[in-house]
Amino acid sequence: MAPGLIGQAVTGLIVVGPLGGLVWAVATAWGRGLSLMNLLVACAFYVVAGHGITVGYHRYLTHGGFKALRPVRIGLAAAGCLAVEGGPIGWVALHRRHHQFSDAEGDPHSPYRFGTSPLAQLRGLVYSHVGWLFSGPAAQPEIYAPDLLADRDIQRINRLFPLIAAISVLAPFLLGWLITGTLAGALSMLLWAGLVRIAVLHHVTWSVNSICHLVGRRPFRTHGRDRARNFWPLAIISMGESWHNLHHADPTCARHGVDRFQFDSSARLIRWLELAAFASDVRWPDQDRINSRRRAQPLKSATSDHTIAA
Ligand SMILES: [Zn+2]
Ligand SMILES: [Zn+2]
């Protein structure tokens, strides 16, 4: 079922608002530059919110790649809310549905939805990037995330999502005010560390759904029609999530960049949590399991032989 009118309007605001900030920021920064402090605060918020999504929402809450102490569980879920991609329960339900139907009928955001001709792939790229947010199939939490519905802490964080999202925008404004003591400084920080940072992280997250199912290598075997790929140019900015072919081949594995020189800061953070005894039972890569899923020859071509019924 597609979201209702109000839901679509809210989603539109969440998609277009930060993007408008990005355009405004580029326009106002032209010739005047952006302060180093703006950049540092924006990066700090990006790293916290980004890992809230990759480590918290994704590897921990969706796939159970490790166990965490209660404060860490709550902290990771709250950090994920800072990314303004919705509360943890809806996010997890949709992502589990994506894994259940990867690139087949029922996948909420497959770029192969309209076919494999160049035009259909272009349409699929746009759909899998943002189009699905407005018209894609829903994933009922009762079916896809009953474990989170039964968790009072996660329920509470989920209810607090609008407040945490507002903090994600207003905290940079206050920080800018404290640092510079001027309204202009506060507004400039709101723009860069608030709106622009949120817009960039949105598009990086959505690129894993779109680009990482269309472009890149497939060194590992995946099930059925699943066309997830490893796309190295996004490795750093996606915090290791663009090693998406390995992730679909072994979804509960806590490390996605399993080969040499494959940057994966999310796995590094999980390792630090484990060393600090905040996390346990981490599902680190098992060499035999990884090798059993490795192809003799990695597939490189983006061509595919199927179409998904719309
Ligand atoms: Zn995927
Ligand atoms: Zn996943």
Image (tube, helix red, strand yellow):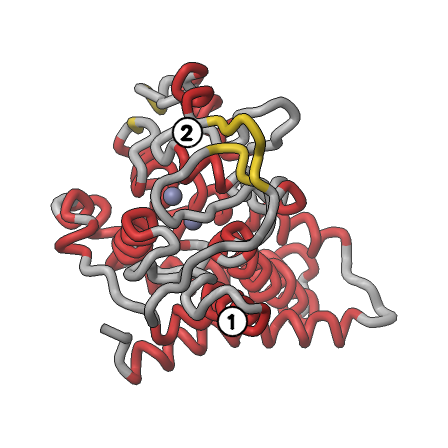
Residue for badge 2: 254
* Amino acid type, callout 2: Ala
100 versus 114 height, above or below: above
Is any part of residue 88 visible from this angle? Answer: no
Q: Is mark 1 within 8 Å of ligand 1?
A: no
Residue at 62 percent across and 46 percent down: it is: 234
Residue 119: percent from the left, percent from the top? 57, 73
Is residue 19 or residue 310 the one in the foreground? 310
> To which quarter of the image does residue 34 belong?
bottom right
**Quadrant into which the C terminus falls:** bottom left
Q: CA distance from mark 2 to mark 1?
A: 34 Å
Task: Tell me, for residue 120, which label it has, or none.
Answer: 1
Q: Is mark 2 within 8 Å of ligand 2?
A: no
Mark with earlier residue (2, 1): 1
**Of the residues tagged 2 and 1, which is closer to the observer?**
1
280 versus 305 height, above or below: above
Q: Quadrant of ligand 2?
A: top left
Is residue 8 or residue 130 the one in the foreground? 130
**Quadrant into which the N terminus falls:** bottom left
Residue at the front extreme of this rendering: 305
Horizontal side of 45 relative to 284 (left or right) equals right
Is any part of residue 78 visible from this angle? Answer: yes
